[in-house]
Amino acid sequence: MSAIAVARPAWRRAPLLMAAILLAWGLAIGAELTGQAQWVHHHRLVVDGVTVWASLALFLVAWQVHIAAMMLPTTLPMVDLFHRVAAGQRHPGLARISFLGGYLAIWTLFGIAALLGNALLGQASQHWPWLLQRPEWLAGAVLVLAGAFQFSSLKERCLDKCRQPRSFLLNHYRQGMTGGFALGVRHGAFCLGCCWALMLVMFVVGIANLAWMAPLAALMLVEKVTRHGRRIVRPTGAVLILAGLLVMAGPAWLPTLVPMHAMH
């Protein structure tokens, strides 16, 4: 049975998860259409006129919306299997919450690390005027990195774990809240292992930038849960590398491939 077939009943058995995914996409689309995208584009450590801690809180909220929209759909096969297996536990609801908590914890830590890295680059650019004058170099480099990672053995190994939720659950399942959390962390780590480079692109183009968010979300979903996902991994990598090289070649490509507001 394909992973996509396993995912279908998960939409029915996890209505709260489904609602969270739809709400996240609704917020992203609504913010874009109403001109309020800045509230979900918090990819900077400090937002103008807002304290550091308030900026971090705003980022964490925006990041959770981002993860709910882009990553939760890709983990539905595992969610569905864990939902059924955990039904025999003493407190199945708590185990399921713990599993999702572990998964989200991994992606939240990645988001914070990427945010801090972005802030450090911003500080470094104050001492490297050439970097301020050539934002397309950084944008292009991230796109090339994301494309190159599509060809890596690490990407393929992590994808294999995500594509075989039954085998993964058989090898690592433990009962209780601690077991659920540990499983969520482990699953999140493999999910991060195959998708981190694509998600890093969002820090360049702007978190919740729909022009990039939708195709990247679709790409990760197809890669992880469809039978023919392997066929698109490397061609997509080639496209990303080409896009990165075009951006690095000249600012004329920047507004088209990477919106200018995302680079400020």
Image: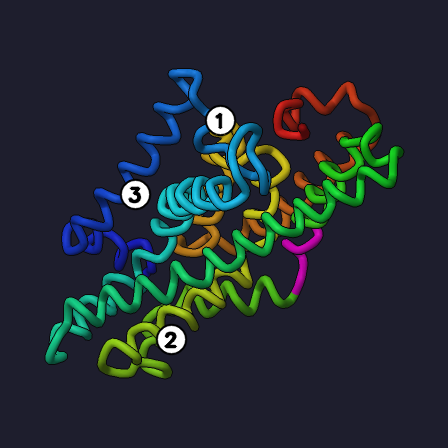
Q: Quadrant of residue 35?
A: top left
Q: Quadrant of the N terminus?
A: bottom left
The main secondary structure of the magenta stretch is loop
Q: Earlier in the sequence, mark 1 or mark 2?
A: 1
User: x, y (%) of residue 178?
Assistant: 30, 79
Q: Which residue is mark 2?
A: 168
Q: Earlier in the sequence, mark 3 or mark 1?
A: 3
Nearer mark to the viewer, of 3 and 1 = 1
Q: Quadrant of residue 214?
A: top left
Label 2 near label 1: C-beta < 8 Å?
Answer: no
Q: Secondary structure at mark 3?
A: helix
Q: Which residue is mark 1?
A: 38
Q: Is residue 36 above or below residue 155?
A: above
Q: Is residue 33 above or below residue 54?
A: above
Q: Is residue 134 visible?
A: yes
Nearer mark to the viewer, of 1 and 2 = 1
For the record, the magenta segment spans 148-152
Q: Secondary structure at mark 1?
A: helix
* Mark 3 and mark 2: Cα distance apart in space: 24 Å
